[in-house]
Image (cartoon, grey):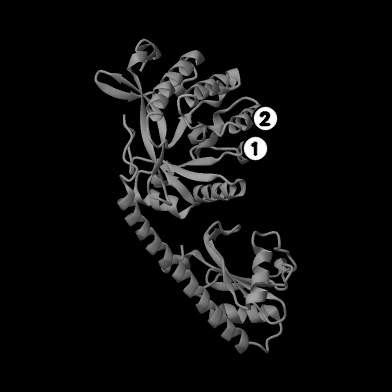
Amino acid sequence: MDALDIMTNLHLIAPFYQAIFSADEHRVVGYEVLGRIELNEEYKSLGSFFHDEAIPEEYRIEVDDIILHKALTHFIELDHQPLIFINRDANLLMIDHGESLLELLLEYQNKGLDLKKIVIELTEHHFIGDIERLNHLLTYYRTYGLKIAVDNIGKESSNFDRIGLLNPDILKIDLKELLKTTTTQSYHDVLYSISLLARKIGATLLYEDVETNFQLQYAWQNGGRYYQGFLLHRPSESIVADDIMKEWLREETQHFIKHEKKKLYTVYDLSEQLNITIQGLVQKFKRVEVYNELLMLLALELNERCFRMYICDGDGFQQSANIMKENQKWLVQEEYYYKNWSWRPYFLENIVRMKYDKKGILSDLYSDVESGESIRTFSYPLTNGHFLFVDIPYEFLFEHDGLL
């Protein structure tokens, strides 16, 4: 679609609205405003127009403002204003330091627009200017009650430091990658890291491009408060009833809860089984004082449930070699003596928990540094202030539903 076709038909430009749903109320909480143009009795997206840097900046700004004027005129007539997500190119925004957009919003505030309902949506990794200046502008916007969302996280590489500096209220995570058959574990790890970042900076997670139940469940499992995508609502010329998907979302959430609780019970049951089993084995071999000998005996008893074992003291210094299974044989890796693992996330926290609870802990799923496979670790307190660590292989987890 040629840019001149758009600029000579500005009267045919219209805002479309895509509903955003909440996980807590299962209702529509807001809308993203999207640009469309009616040509040959068909509405076409203006996305490529806005993303084409060859098109003059003033053209793109003019079209953006037309869409926003029409959308805000519609929203101020509503009895209850939802969250209104407004896409803005950060590079264009900084041309006049954000003044024209703010003036437009203040104009509509005088007509009844609640600025606390406005969310300015930016794509951080497209911005080529001074990030500090952009941050100052966004801080200024917040004094008027405006919220900030960073878009397209997960679609392209994003700089977590820059995102942290901008301190957005909402992080939008793209889930299209989940539909690919080649989705890697590293992709899931990145999304997990984003969820941790959101928690640290107090941001809400909004998962977009939700097109399947699988993606919706993934968003629910991974801290998503808001959902957006074709599965729930396609962009349209009008807004929809707040409760349009309420019953369906409530039913789907019940399925998710049932499935997740089943997994949690499975993990809890395995932890209890390992506590009972290892407690009995430690008692059985209590006369064995040399740790490497003890570990070898334990390894033979737990052969199908582990691939590596070692013992550490309360500060994380390894007091044994690694007992490692390779090609169905158990090997002693002496080089691991006295290595310190206190730097690992949750290591010391788990040590303290075991000390007070006097029982073992099964870790969450994580990628093993050496093999790259998804594993879990069971940690168990011994009687002398030392702790046993049992690494459980992917094969065992895969064969037991709910452990992956």
Q: Earlier in the sequence, mark 1 or mark 2?
A: 2
The residue closer to the viewer here, 298 or 269, is: 269
* Rendered position, 58 above or below 210: above
Q: Which residue is painted at 31% across and 38% down in the image?
A: 240
Q: Which mark is residue 221?
A: none
- What residue is pinned by disc 2? 132
Pointer 2: residues within 10 angstroms few (<14), some, or many (20+)?
few
* Residue receiving disc 1: 165
Question: Where, quadrant-wise, is the N terminus in this rendering?
Answer: top left
Residue plotted at (52% across, 72% down): 328
Q: Splitting the image into 4 quarters, where does residue 79 fall?
A: top left
Judged left or right of residue 203, residue 1 is left
How many numbered marks are there? 2
**Residue 193: image x %, image y %?**
57, 49
At horizontal 54% and vertical 72% (from top left) the residue drawn is 306
The reply to whether callout 1 and callout 2 are in contact (CB within 8 Å) is yes
* On screen, residue 83 above or below 89: below
At label 1, counting other C-alpha atoms closer than 10 Å, the crowd grade (few under 14, some 14-19, many 20 or more) is: few
**Mark pair 1, 2: CA separation:** 8 Å
Q: Kindly identify the amino acid type of the residue bearing the numbered disc 1.
A: Leu
Percent coordinates x, y for residue 346 in the rendering: 64, 62
- Give the percent coordinates (x, y) of residue 163: 60, 38
Q: Residue at x 40, y 24 (%)?
A: 73
Looking at the image, the residue that sits furthest to the left is 41
**Which type of secondary structure does the marked residue at label 2 adopt?**
helix
Q: Is residue 170 visible?
A: yes
Q: Is residue 398 left or right of residue 203?
A: left
Q: Amino acid at mark 2?
A: Glu
Residue 132 image position (x, y, % from top left): 67, 30
Q: Is residue 148 above or below residue 280?
A: above
Q: Helix, strand, or loop for circle 1?
A: helix
Q: Write down the quadrant of residue 299 in the picture.
A: bottom right
